[in-house]
Amino acid sequence: MKLKKLGLLLLVLTVTLPFTAFGASADSGSKAGSGTVPADPSFTNVSVHDPSIVRDGDTYYVFGSHIEAAKSTDLMNWERFTNGYATPNNVLYGNLPQNLATSFKWAGENDSDSKGGFSVWAPDVFWNASYRNSDGTKGAYMLFYCTSSTYIRSAIGFAVSQNIEGPYTYGDTLLYSGFTANEAYDANSVINKKWTNTNIPQLIKEGKLSEESDKWFNADGTFANLQYPNAIDPQLMWDKSGKLWMSYGSWSGGIYTLQIDPATGKAIYPGKDSVTKDGRMVDRYFGTKIAGGYYKSGEGPYMVYNKDTDYYYLFETIGWLGADGGYNMRLYRSNNPLGPFVDAAGQSAVLAEDTDNSSVGNKLMGNFLFKREVGDPGTGIGYGYVSPGHNSFYQDPKTGKMFLVFHSRFPKQGEVHEVRVHQMFMNKDGWLVASPYRYAGESLAKVNRQDLIGEYKFINHGKGTTADIVESSYVTLNKNNKVTGDESGSWKTTGHNDAELTLDGKTYKGVFVQGWDPLAESFVMTFTAMSSDGVAIWGSKQQEKTDVQLVRDVIADLNVGDTSRVIANLDLPSEGARHASIAWTSSDPAIVSAEGVVTRPASGTPAAEVTLTAVVAKGAASGTKSFKLTVLPYTDAALLAKYSFDNDLSDSTGSFGDGTITGNRIDNTGGTMSYATGVAGQAAVFDGNSGVKLPNKLIDSNQYSVSLWVKPDQLTTYTTTFFGAKDGFNWVSLVPQGPAANQTMVWSGSGVWYDGATGLTIPTGEWTHLAYSVDNGTLSVYVNGKQTFSGSNFPDIFTGSDSVFSLGVNWWDAPFKGQLDELQLFDGALSPPQIERLSER
């Protein structure tokens, strides 16, 4: 399901080509001089969700959801030129609510999921030389968009302009979804969803539809969304005969295709129901089903034609778009824009039954991490993506280069997303594969076999749709054409750059191509290939080094953090680059064990001195490195505020003011609060529609603790108990059921997201004591007096800011329902005796 999401699509059009075309064989990319390594690239990133690419002159544009767009002349450095939902001077739409009033009358403006704002998603922009303007001239940039209020109630329309950067003038609303047989209303909505409030009655009157269809409705009159689509994510394509097609849809009944009249931009509806030769639905209004169904994930369709293979290729993204949703891109092909589309294994893109769709479609890429090990070049955890998807596609008509354009989130960076562009290549089986690295100006060229031999970091993307991140392993392409290392098999290259690897009995076909490794900060040899069952593999060649050099690199890079004030367990790596082993010993295992477990001295006792020694070995080479640690004793934290909820919301210390009752969000009103017997005296009873706003600046440092008793009536993901924030992008939340496998956790969002997961989920209907301490970046979490999490690098959210605090509510998620008691806040980290006392009843 897509909530306040975005869309990316693209139509590749040129004056000389009356269709969207791409492709050439892998060898065709080898042009004179193409083997020259380009200059080191620079990148300027931009956040445009669901980016749909189009080229105008020498400038590339990406248009995305939430009325965001950007432009570039090199596909590497992007500049935003839009102003989001700002109105009346909206860059793309002018007066937004007036211009799109007809579409908003059905969905997307201050209604249901878009309450308080707008939801305009997933546009596709292209130049249509055949479009008849109102003044009688021909030719316009057409922007197809969608508006949405719920997971099924949406609309698709279009607007036109003589300038690609707008403003665009409303043309028509073509499709509605989520309508009902009778009068009905969604939550927080005054819109009557009855089908007669769509364009269907007018289409019947004009003879374009025979009549409404009973099949559109379930027995109770609701929209039959298991078979019929959610009208979002439009994408336009010219076929090889010059006909214009729009593919669209998300989850629900799947992806559909409708023919569009180029002169008017209006849909050419089938008019009557039928079935394709292979048994797929053709609906009188919605068109022909080409993918998905049964409310399985699948959205952001993008279709293009390849004149060399004579196939139409259909991209689709499955999974959930969030960082924890496993969003990933799939690929199918067909000889006809109406399908049937199949993957490399011959499986249909249209689901035949209500089943897991992860096994269907060629998986182009999913969550991955070329992991940076100790001793590797660069900094940080490595290079990778989380939930890459909702792509568009472009082929340069002069160079033949093909590009996959999509948005992605990133490992340990939460919901931060940016546009990425990867070059694509056609393998010998006529399937597209994507470069492991973002485009940096490289060209496909003839390769020297000797340059291919060596050790590679290796990714197998598999077929699953999961939040798990595939981390790199190692393989070596040997001179004798054997593959050894973490995978075994054989390899070969044919032609100028074709790659063929056989691993564990499966053959993968693709190309060898240079790519910019951001960690090594250099161009390296890579391979990308696809198996006959639609599994993609990648390789990134590593610099050739001896075992002695590797040991030296690991020792030089090995670090255990601040050794002068150790207060939490240490993360001691057991392995470095290229599987170099790291073994640890401690001079005092009772204080710091060889596994990094720290036992701090008691409060009032001296600090302890410990030496940790690491032995690094690779083959016959080895070396040592020692670290002298000072382990600090515990200190007792000082009470800052105490809210006992004895029939009021006062701070019994008198240091801070009373809490105030809110509605279902931290910034609204209308809630109620009652009290019942709690752990000590009375407890606050939260009804699931109310919360409490606490005084600002309750916490103003990076050394603090929070303690409270929690008794949930129900558990809902993301719901907070104690919440604090500097702003909407920097916050900390204590959640009984968080996004990490539903665990109780301290969850934080800032430049990166932080999961302080406890390894358990607290029960409903009974009291649980929760506490956490932050000590200059060290987070400790406790459940019923026992430490369940310890981690470093926790963000400093509150120091020097006028932060807001609340109980049971935040700005986004379902409010808490249950009871809270004995909220206490402390200056400093809690000591074990303090934790023990606070957790006693």
Image (spheres, rainbow, N blue to C red):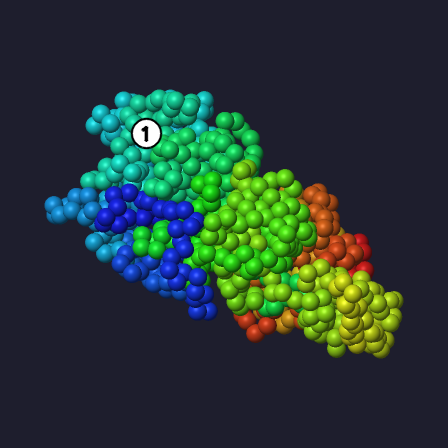
Q: Secondary structure at mark 1?
A: loop
Residue at the extreme front of the image, as rendered? 480
Q: Report the residue at 21% width, 54% height from top.
A: 162
Q: Residue 791 in the image: x percent, y percent?
A: 70, 62
Q: Is 185 above or below relative to 783?
A: above
User: For the residue marked with disc 1, what is the amino acid?
Assistant: Tyr
Judged left or right of residue 491, residue 216 is left
Q: Report the residue at 79% width, 56% height from top.
A: 786
Which residue occupies the foreground of this view, 613 or 791? 613
Q: Is 793 above or below relative to 736?
A: below
Q: Which residue is mark 1?
A: 285
Judged left or right of residue 616, residue 144 is left
| Quadrant of residue 560 within the rendered picture | bottom right
Which residue occupies the foreground of this view, 53 or 726? 53
Mark yes or no: residue 95 visible: no
Q: Number of labelled discs? A: 1
Q: Report the residue at 68% width, 53% height from top.
A: 485
- The quadrant of the rendering that contains the C terminus is bottom right
Q: Is 610 above or below relative to 712?
A: below
| Quadrant of residue 441 within the rendered picture | bottom left
Q: Report the residue at 56% width, 34% height from top.
A: 356
How many residues crowd mark 1 within 10 Å: few (<14), some (14–19), many (20+)? many
Q: Residue 211 in the image: x percent, y percent?
A: 29, 22
Q: Is 575 above or below relative to 489?
A: below
Q: Residue 516 in the image: x percent, y percent?
A: 50, 63
Q: Residue 19 in the image: x percent, y percent?
A: 28, 43
Judged left or right of residue 458, residue 60 is left
Mark yes or no: residue 475 visible: yes
